[in-house]
Image (cartoon, coloured by chain):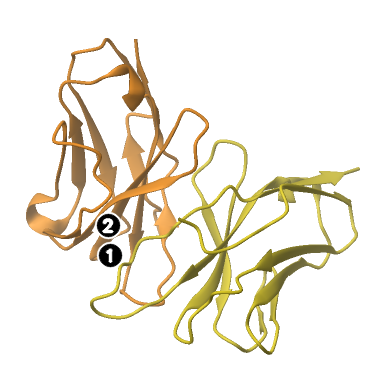
Chain colours: A yellow, B orange
Amino acid sequence: DAKTTQPPSMDCAEGRAANLPCNHSTISGNEYVYWYRQIHSQGPQYIIHGLKNNETNEMASLIITEDRKSSTLILPHATLRDTAVYYCIVRAPGEGGSEKLVFGKGMKLTVNP
Amino acid sequence: EAGVTQFPSHSVIEKGQTVTLRCDPISGHDNLYWYRRVMGKEIKFLLHFVKESKQDESGMPNNRFLAERTGGTYSTLKVQPAELEDSGVYFCASSQDRGVSRQFFGPGTRLTVL
């Protein structure tokens, strides 16, 4: 079962920042937070991941609270092409641990013109 | 760099027939994963190869499904005999390393069993 909770859907205006929340209150100390998205019927696409520090890449920023029980994915300037289902996933890396990604229901982000 | 490719993109078969799906991972990626989404459900993990070895096959639904990765390059997923409930989209992903490494997904194969 997924270890994360996300709202089912969110709307955002084109050009504005989209802030996507995720709760992971039972996260363990060695578990990372990953974000993937699925645009329409394409394969899931990696966005970003982090452990406890905030992270930024060319796609998005990830803000993780100090207690690590929640995080926010930020798309700084949402475009229509960012309309997708976004998945927040927690996973522990390392030998002996499962490498699988556990996808929950995700959150449908709709970017409106 | 070519991404993960899957073949075919669509397959329509009748119940009881056999279908083989193929996945070509990104060159040099030792880790290969199969996932599937059936009938509006969530995407579910099926199994994980490290090179030619099955590392984790805990998600395989039953013995009608057989995955192989001979030589540690491409992988095939055979469904024999196919049932109606096998309809869905089958995704393949690959990653270079284990652990924190990101997984790169292919476009998926849409399987319809009539």
Q: Position of residue A53 (x, y in %)?
A: 63, 89
Whether residue A94 is situated above or below residue A91 in the rendered picture: below
Q: Position of residue B11 (x, y in %)?
A: 34, 21
Q: Identify which residue is drawn at 20% across, 53% down.
A: B57
Q: Is residue A61 visible?
A: no
Q: Position of residue A73 (x, y in %)?
A: 71, 68
- Of badges 1 and 2, nearer the viewer stands 2
Q: Is residue B105 left or right of residue B96?
A: right
Q: Which mark is residue B32?
A: 2
Q: Identify which residue is drawn at 62% across, 37% down.
A: A40
Question: Which chain's residue wears label 1?
Answer: B
Q: Identify which residue is drawn at 60% across, 70% down.
A: A24
Q: Is residue A13 left or right of residue B37?
A: right
Q: Nearer the viewer, residue B90 or B5?
A: B90
Q: Which corner quadrant of the image does residue A97 belong to?
A: bottom left
Q: Nearer the viewer, residue B31 or A107?
A: A107
Q: Position of residue A81 (x, y in %)?
A: 73, 47
Amino acid type of the residue that numbered disc 2 sits on in the rendered structure? Leu
Tags 1 and 2 touching, CB below 8 Å:
yes
Amino acid type of the residue that numbered disc 1 sits on in the rendered structure? His
What kind of element bears circle 2?
A: strand
Whether residue B90 is situated above or below residue A10 in the rendered picture: above
Q: Which corner quadrant of the image does residue B37 belong to?
A: top left
What kind of element bears circle 1?
A: loop
Q: Is residue A25 left or right of residue B55?
A: right
Which residue matches tag 1? B29
Q: Nearer the viewer, residue A34 or A4?
A: A4
Q: Distance between the Cα atoms at labels 1 and 2?
A: 7 Å
Quadrant (top left, top right, bottom left, bottom right) of the N terminus of chain B: bottom left
Q: Which mark is residue B79?
A: none
